[in-house]
Amino acid sequence: MPDDLDMPPGEALQEAQKLLDADRPFHAHEVLEAVWKASPEPERELWRGLAQIAVGITHLRRGNARGAEALLSRAAERLVPYETSAPHGINVRGVVQRARDLAASPENGPVTLRLTA
């Protein structure tokens, strides 16, 4: 991923989903992180949480269940405030639930995640 990646939120969500579906969660993290850093303040924590979930999945893939649990749990809590008014069609409730499920039982794969409704 280029360091100067600049995508609108909808396009970034599509790209991140493609990367997650292709089992490339770290690359999805890079896309989500770029949006996080460019987002207006009210959405920054949303994108930060999504990026952290992608890194948590990366930890799961690498066998670091303990690190994954901590990161997925923290990211889910970061997303909770957005559950009632999720912007950009993001499936915040579903993402939070899946992150919590993976944190509680990392062995319950495959690791699938739908970012949008």
Image (cartoon, grey):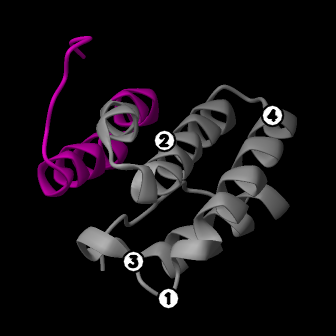
> Closer to the camera: disc 1 or disc 4?
1
Q: For mark 4, does the 10 Å Cα neighbourhood hold few (<14), some (14 to 19), or many (20 or more) residues?
A: some
Going by the picture, which residue comes out furthest to the top? 3
Residue for point 19% across, 23% down: 5
> Closer to the camera: disc 3 or disc 4?
3
Of residues 106 and 87, the one drawn nearer to the viewer in this rendering = 87
Residue for point 78% across, 30% down: 64
In the displayed structure, does residue 19 sit left or right of residue 4? right
Q: How far apart are the alpha carbons under marks 1 and 2?
A: 20 Å
**Which secondary structure, mark 3?**
loop
Tags 4 and 2 touching, CB below 8 Å: no
Q: Earlier in the sequence, mark 3 or mark 2?
A: 2
**Which secondary structure, mark 4?**
helix
The amino acid on which the numbered mark 1 sits, given as a three-letter code, is: Thr
Residue behind mark 3: 86
The magenta stretch is 1-30
Vertical order, 18 against 80 (above or below): above
